[in-house]
Structure formats: C-alpha cells, structure tokens
Amino acid sequence: MSRWPRMLSSNARRLRSCSRRLSRDLSGSVAIASAFMFPLIIGSVGLGVETGYWYVSQRQLQHVADVSAHAGALRKKAGDSATAYTEAARYLASKSGFAGPSSAILVNTPPSTGAFTAKTDAVEVIISEDLPRYFTSFFTRDPLTIEARAVARVDGNPTCVLALATTGSGAFHVGGSTELNLPTCDIVSNSTHANSFQMQGAAARITAACVYSAGGVSANSNLGLEVCEAAEENAAPVADPYADVTQPAVTGVCANGNVSNTTLTPTEAHASGVSSKRFCSGLSISGAVHLDPGLYIIGGGNLSGSNGATLTGSGVTLFFTNGARVSLSNSTTQTLSAPTSGPFSGILMFGDRNDPNLSHTARGSGSSSFQGAIYFPAGHMDYRGNSASTNGCTQLIAKTIDFGGNSSFSSSCDAAGTRSIRAGRYITVVEEA
C-alpha cells in the first residue's frame, strides 16, 4: 500500500474520533441549554393558560354585571325602592354564578361615572372578584382582582302627562273642543277604572306619541298617536317620579301677597339651602311681576292675577301649602321656568302632599308657557298652557287631570333639570366596562 492511502485512512480515523468527541461535547451543551429553557417554555405555556383563564373569568363577570344591571333596571321601571332594585341586582348576580360576597356588588342610580351620571332612570352595577393565582404565584402571592361594570337604562318615549290616581273614572279627561298637541311624548293614567282615560265630546282632539292606561280607554276618533298603533289598556302603572323629593319646610316671615309691577327676590335662608320668600295669605299679582330665582312658599290663599297681568321668572319653584291653590285665568300671561339643579331641580309648581283633593287651575293666555314639572300629587289640575318653546319641556303630574282649551307640550327635557318619566318602557344595557 502506498503512503497516500495510509495517510487518508489515518486522517479518516482522526476525523471520526474528533466527531465522536464533538458529539459528546455538544450533547452536554444541549442538556445544559435545555435545563435552562424548559422552565421558560413551561412558564410561557402556563402564563398563556392563566391569561386565558383571566380573560374567560372577566367575560363571565361582565355577563353577571350585565344581567344584574338589567334586573335592577326592571325593578326601577316598576317603581320599586333603591333597596328593592339593589336586592334584585345582587340576587341575579348570585344566580348567574357569582360566588363572592354581596358587598362586592355596588348598585348606583344614577350611575357614579360615565355618560349617564345625571340619568335617574339608569342603574349601574359594579362587581369585583379576586382570582387565585396559579403559575404566576411564583412571582406574587397577591390575588388578582378583576372588575366589571354595566349600566342599564329604562328607555322609551318620554311621558309628559301623568295622572297618579289609581281608582276612579276620568283620572285623565278632556272634553268639549279641547285640542291637546303632544306629538313627542306620552299620556299615562294610573287608574284601573274602565274609563281611566276619557275623551268626551266629538270635537275633542288629542295628538300624542302613545297613550297608556292602567284601566280602560274611552276615546273618540280624534285620538291620533304618532308612535304607537293604538292606546294600550291594562298597562303597568308609572311611579311618581318625584315621590322621594322632600317637600319644603314652611318657614319664614310672611310677606305681603298683594304685589304689582315689581320684582320679587327670595332673601330668607331656607333649610333646603335655597333662598326663599313666604306668602301666608296667597299671592295676587297685577301689572308686570317678575320672580327672581328661588323658592316661593304660598299658603292660605290662591296664586291669582288680575286682567292683563304678567308673571315671569326663571329658576323658580312655587310651593303651595295650607290649602293654597293655583287660580290663574286666561287673562294673565305666565312665562315661568323651574331650576335646573338643586333640591327642587325641574319642579316649577309643587303641591303639598298633605293637601288632598284641592282643585288647581292654570289657564294662561295663548302665549303663556311653563318649563318644568307642574306637580300636584294629591290634587286635581285643570290645565291649559304650553311648553316654553318648540324645544321646551313641560311635565304635568297630578292625582287627576282635566285639559281645556288648546295646549301644546314638547318633551325636550335634557336641559330642564326634570326627571325622566317613561311609560312604554324597555330595558337596554347602555354601558359596559
């Protein structure tokens, strides 16, 4: 054999020997690298699994918040107390799989945050839950707290006329040649009588968005509905939207109630925090009388005006007590608006709940206008008037209501400070977080 074959054979043996030694060296490196990499790989898989668990838990908690807010809004729609709709929300949460304490479920109305903080027809539910840690417990032992929030709102057409009486014929009544124009809002009568909603006379005309009666409807062919196909009978009653407003304490020095061509200014400090002025024997106006913002307490007589008198004012609440009545004829012109904030927000006229069955008359001239709620929960209102403008807001709420003459209402109440009243109502979840 020549020298070259022997050299090639020898070199091949050396290469195989080096390869075996390199293989042994590399297998050790792989083992070391694997020892470092496997915990990272397993940790990454574990973190992915746990993150997925967090996501699923968050979605489940959001579902619980949604159905709980919806349940609370249903009780709100029915006119229940805050205690009742809070209990309903917490009950539905427990039945939907939430096992945490009831203290972890907060129920607010109006909502504490978001776009509906001024909406008393909205219910907010906030639920928090602590999740145990698994793979991430290598880094911290603290539980992970997740939170879900939902806001459900009672929705539907606004109601601008509400007769609160639960019994009796004609709780809501129009007759003669009355023409009532309420194309964007509803009329509601809570009476269960067969003639709860009553139109008498062939000439009476009503245009409204919808009509709801807890009893029956007696109407002529001039009842025109802009939204609903027909008046709804045996409907659920609508709760008094201002039932929880504390009526003003009757305090202050008695002022002279015969006023003419002047401006009245409330100057007394009232317990409500609103400046007040008190009239103990009614308030009779002549000429041009202007009311500065504040609370006017009228007791023991009537609010009346002489022929040609004008009564104006913004940011005012007129409280009628001790048998006082509204007695405004069509010979006077009234242009009045309620405060948009404060303890009597949205309430223009407020009748004492302890003065039952008084009859009030508000029959201003064709140019009279009222902005806010005319609220006589224990009395009867004989009414003729208008909203402040085509974009105004008038709510008429009384035990029983009778319309005469021609009246036009508008329901653009977002900036009027009034509370929302809904009749043909449905529940929608409007916010999630």
Image (cartoon, rainbow, N blue to C red):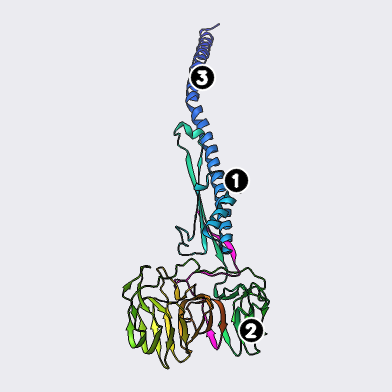
Q: Nearer the viewer, residue 263 or 107?
A: 263
Mark carried by residue 270:
none
Label 1: how many Cα within 10 Å (few below 14, some 14–19, many 20+)? few
Q: Amino acid at mark 3?
A: Ser
For mark 1, what is the residue? Answer: 97
Q: Can you give x and y, in whole percent of width and height, for residue 178 in the image?
A: 58, 88
**What is the count of numbered marks?**
3
Q: Nearer the viewer, residue 407 or 155?
A: 407
Q: Amino acid at mark 2?
A: Met
For mark 2, what is the residue? Answer: 199
Q: Which residues are magenta?
A: 404-433
Q: Nearer the viewer, residue 63 or 422?
A: 422
132 up-or-down from 173: above or below: above
Label 3 sits on a secondary structure element that is: helix
Distance of mark 2 from mark 1, alpha carbons?
Answer: 51 Å
Please identify the quadrant where the N terminus is shown. Answer: top right
